[in-house]
Amino acid sequence: MNYKLIVRPEAEAELKDAYIWYEQQTVGLGSQFMLSVDAAINSIRRNPHQYPVVYKDIHRALTRRFPYQIFFTVNDMNVVIIAVFHGMRNPSVWQGRN
């Protein structure tokens, strides 16, 4: 079963910033980052409850190859992406978003 995906504006901005940063490091690396995030999001949409709850009702999925975490909630038939965060950032920033 695929859940409907909703990406909050803050998460979109984080994705865009990460893409730009990686692309500036090496041409094409930003695209590889986006493919990694896309694979994680597709897995989340198929079975969001396979990912652990890490804070209140917020789940976390990790990306492959890149040190990013995708934080999301699940309600009814929706998956709401609230943050796409580098693993070294302060988690208190996204914790107030739910």
Image (cartoon, rainbow, N blue to C red):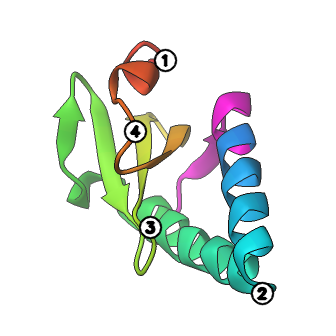
Task: Identify residue for label 3.
Answer: 46
> Is label 1 or label 2 in front?
2
Q: Which residue is rendered at x = 42% and y = 81% of the image?
A: 65
| Left or right side of 22 for 44 | left
| Magenta residue check for 82 | no
* Whole-percent x, y for residue 85 in the image: 48, 45
The mark found on residue 28 in the picture is 2
Type of amino acid under label 2: Gly
Estimate the spatial distance between the alpha carbons at disc 4 and disc 3, rounded to whole Å. Answer: 27 Å
Which sits in the foreground, 79 or 12? 12
User: Mark 3 and 1 residues: CB-CB less than 8 Å, in contact?
Assistant: no
Residue at 20% across, 40% down: 53
Instruction: Tell me the kind of residue under disc 1.
Output: Arg
Start-end of magenta stretch: 1-12
Element under disc 4: loop
Q: Are marks 4 and 3 in contact (CB under 8 Å)?
A: no
Q: Which residue is mark 1?
A: 97
What amino acid is labelled 3 in the image?
Arg
The answer to the question of whether label 4 and label 2 lie on touching residues, with beta carbons closer than 8 A, is no
> Gap between marks 4 and 2, in whole Å?
24 Å
Q: Tell me if residue 92 comes above or below residue 32 in the rendering.
A: above
Q: Secondary structure at mark 2?
A: loop
The Cα–Cα distance between marks 1 and 4, rounded to whole angstroms, is: 15 Å
Local crowd at mark 2 within 10 Å, few (<14), some, or many (≥20)?
Answer: few
Q: Quadrant of the C terminus?
A: top left
Mark 1 residue element: loop
Counting residues from the N terminus, which is met first, the one under dot 3 or under dot 2? 2
Q: For the residues carrying marks 4 and 3, which lies nearer the camera in this image?
A: 4
